[in-house]
Amino acid sequence: MEKETPMQSPELAYTPQVAAATAKLYDRVAHVIPQVEWPVHAPYVLAINELKRQRNAVILAHNYMTPEIFHCVADFVGDSLQLAREAAKTDAKVIVQAGVHFMAETSKILSPDKTVLIPDMKAGCSLAASITGADVRLLKQKYPGLPIVTYVNTSAEVKAESDVCCTSSNARAVVEDIAREWGTDTVIMIPDEYLAQNIARQTRIRIITWKGHCEVHERFSAADIRAYREGNPGVVVLAHPECPPEVIAEADFAGSTAAMIGYVGDKRPKKVVMVTECSMSDNVAADYPDVEFVRPCNLCPHMKRITLPKILQSLETMSAEVTVDPFIAARARAAVERMLAVGQAQPKRAAA
Ligand code: 13P
Ligand code: SF4
C-alpha cells in the first residue's frame, strides 16, 4: 500500500501575500476584529481554507464560535438544528465540528460513513453532563407509557434511550407532534429544566422535566434585564430559551440562536441586547453594523475551546475523531431523524 505523505504545517507568518489573500475576509469582520489583531488570525485562516479543500472537509460552525471562525473559515453556520440538517446532507468526506462534543456526535450519528473531527475533545456542555442513559432508563420506569423528548444537548447514549430529539428552535412543535402521535397530554422533556418550563408556557401539553441547566444561560436574571433596559432606554431584549422563565418573561423575544439572528435581520432594531453567549453579538454585529449591540453576555468555556490553531491542527492530524458505538448510533439516529422530520429550518451557507 502506498504510504501517505504527512501534511506539513504551513508557514504561519503574516506576509504581504497572506495579507492580500485574506483581505476580503478581513473586510467581513473589520467591524468586530481590530486591524491590529488580524495578523494573528490571517495565516491560520488561509492555511485552514486551503487544507479543508485538500481534505474534502466542511467546517460546520455553531453561532457561538468567535468571528474569525464563524465568518472566515466556516462552510456552514447555524443553530443546533441547522447544523444537524447540514451534517445529514453534506457530500464532504470529512466534517470538522466547530462546536461542542454533542454536536459532533449528532453529526456522526447522521453521517456514520463520514469522518467527524472535533478540534478539542474536551469541548463539553453542562446540559449534556447533567444526565446519563441510566437516568433515562429510570425515568422510563417511573413514568411508563410517556414519550421522552430529549434536547440535542445530550450524549448519544441519552439520545438512544429517547423517542425523539428537539432543539430550541423546534421544541414546541416536537412536543406537540409526539403527544399527538402517542395520544397523550403529558410528555417527559429532558434535560433542560428551563427550556422545558418555557415550552410548557406555550402549549397545553403537560411537561415533566429534569434538573439540567446551561451554565451560560442560567446566570442571567430578571434583574439583569431590567438593568439593561434602565441603562439603555428603547433597547430590544432577545433571550435564549435556555434562560430561566423569569428572564424570558422580561424579554421582547425568545428563540434559538438562529431565531435571534433572524429577528435582527428582519426588524433591524436600533439597539439590541442578546441575552446569550458572547460571540453571538460579535457575529451578528459584523453583518449589521447599523445596529447597536449592548453587550453584557456570558462566555461558554466549552465553545471557547475551539480556536483557529486547534482547527488547523485537527485538519493536519485528522484528529480528534468522534466515534459512536454503532448499536447506540442506530437507536439515537431514529430519535434525531424523527425530529428532523418535524421542523424545516434550512442551514445558511457561509461565505468562506
Ligand atoms: P441553539 O443554537 O440551537 O439555539 O442552541 C444554543 C446552545 O446553547 C447550543 O449549545
Ligand atoms: Fe452547553 Fe450552554 Fe455551552 Fe451551549 S452554551 S454548549 S448549552 S453550556
Image (tube, rainbow, N blue to C red):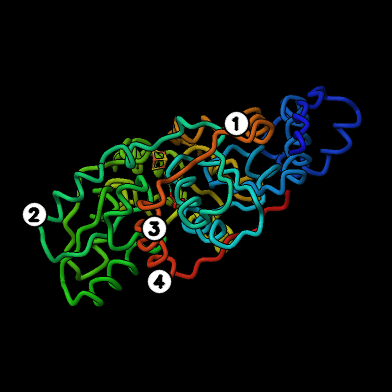
Kind of residue at disc 4: Val
Q: CA distance from mark 4 to mark 1?
A: 33 Å
Residue identifier under label 4: 342
Distance between the alpha carbons at the discs numbered 3 and 1: 31 Å
Circle on res. 142: 2
Quadrant hosting ligand 2? top left
Foreground residue, 112 or 54? 112
Q: Quadrant of the N terminus?
A: top right
As drawn, the label of residue 307 is 1
Q: Give percent across and percent down for residue 242.
A: 34, 48
Q: Is residue 254 visible?
A: no
Q: Amino acid at mark 1?
A: Thr
Q: Looking at the picture, which amino acid does disc 3 mark?
A: Ala
Comparing marks 2 and 3, which lies closer to the viewer?
3
Amino acid type of disc 2?
Lys
Name the secondary structure under disc 2: helix
